[in-house]
Amino acid sequence: MARVGRAAVVNWRRRHADFPAPAGGTDMHRRFDRAPVVAWLLAHDKIEVPVAMPSASLVVHGGAGRPASRFRLDDPHLDLADDAGGEDELSGWLTDAEADEPAALAAGTFGASVDRLTAPGTVPLAVLGEVRVIERFRSGSGGLRLTPAWPAGLRGTAASGARGGLVRHGVAYVGPGEGCVRKRHDCGGVVPVSWCQEHGDTVGPVLEWHPAGGIRCTDLAGRIAGDAAAQA
């Protein structure tokens, strides 16, 4: 928040008796509650903005049976590509210790996956694999800015609930008839079931899966809307 390193915090704690007490951590890596630290920084003119500080929440899964990890990125910037061949990028400030873990998760053979990304200005997103860290930038004042990226074609809407995960749509081999009671999406995708012969079966139910809310989904929905307008 103040864009300073650990040495500056140690100095503040030594010189100011009213500096907030640690809420946890170790002797080498103290952790502090955000609210009292913000109040102290404002009171001592260490920061100038008495406004909300936006952040992004990132739930990353490294695969191979590893549990998902949650990270907070301060002052985030999300750049979403408008082409399936492009790449999405997210950047934000973390501490050294927090930045090491997502970088390690993304260093696997196929990169990490994002189970849930909640960032200002966009719906919760998820990414199916191939997430990697493309930049680690350290400012002169000690802050560390991390930038993960992933193929835009793998990005989609995150499932509701805390676990997140990618929502997928299935485009059936045969278009749904008038009697079809399955939920239909704007892209033409359906949720196939074993007894619905129109949509194959549970073994071979669809022609393709694609991320809900992703570029492919949006493209298919636009084509359907255009065809309907032309017929009208």
Image (cartoon, rainbow, N blue to C red):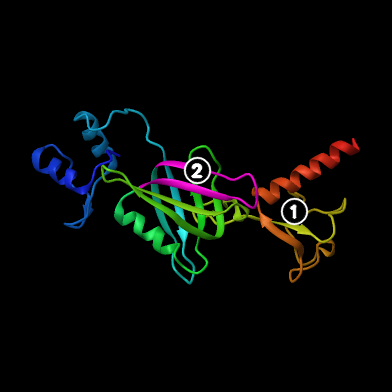
The stretch drawn in magenta includes residue 91: yes
Q: Nearer the viewer, mark 1 or mark 2?
A: 2
Q: Name the residue under label 1.
A: 189
Q: Residue at 27% x, 43% y: name it.
A: 140
Q: Where is residue 230 in the image (x, y as percent from the top left)?
A: 88, 37
Q: Position of residue 188 (x, y in %)?
A: 77, 50
Q: Which of 193 and 221 is in front in this view?
A: 221
Vertical order, 110 against 132 (above or below): below
Q: Is residue 186 visible?
A: no
Query: Around disc 1, counting alpha carbons within 10 Å, would you say few (fewer than 14), some (14 to 19), or many (20 or more)?
Result: many
Identify the secondary structure beneath mark 1.
Answer: loop
Gap in angstroms between the C-alphas marked 1 and 2: 28 Å
Q: Which amino acid does label 1 sit on?
A: Gly
Identify the secondary structure beneath mark 2.
Answer: strand
Q: Which residue is situated farthest in the right direction here?
A: 231
Q: Can residue 127 be seen in this view?
A: yes
Left or right: where does residue 11 sit relative to residue 166? Answer: left
Q: Mark 2 points at which residue?
A: 78
Q: Position of residue 177 (x, y in %)?
A: 87, 53
Q: Quadrant of the C terminus?
A: top right
Q: Main secondary structure of the magenta part?
A: strand
Disc sitting over residue 103 in the figure: none
The stretch drawn in magenta includes residue 131: no
Q: In which quarter of the image is the N terminus?
A: top left
Q: Residue at 59% x, 56% y: name it.
A: 166
Left or right: where does residue 78 sit relative to residue 34? Answer: right
Vertical order, 8 against 177 (above or below): above
The magenta-colored residue range is: 75-93
Figure quadrant of residue 231:
top right
State which tag comes first along the sequence, 1 or 2: 2
Q: Where is residue 150 in the image (x, y as percent from the top left)?
A: 54, 55
Q: Which amino acid does label 2 sit on?
A: Leu
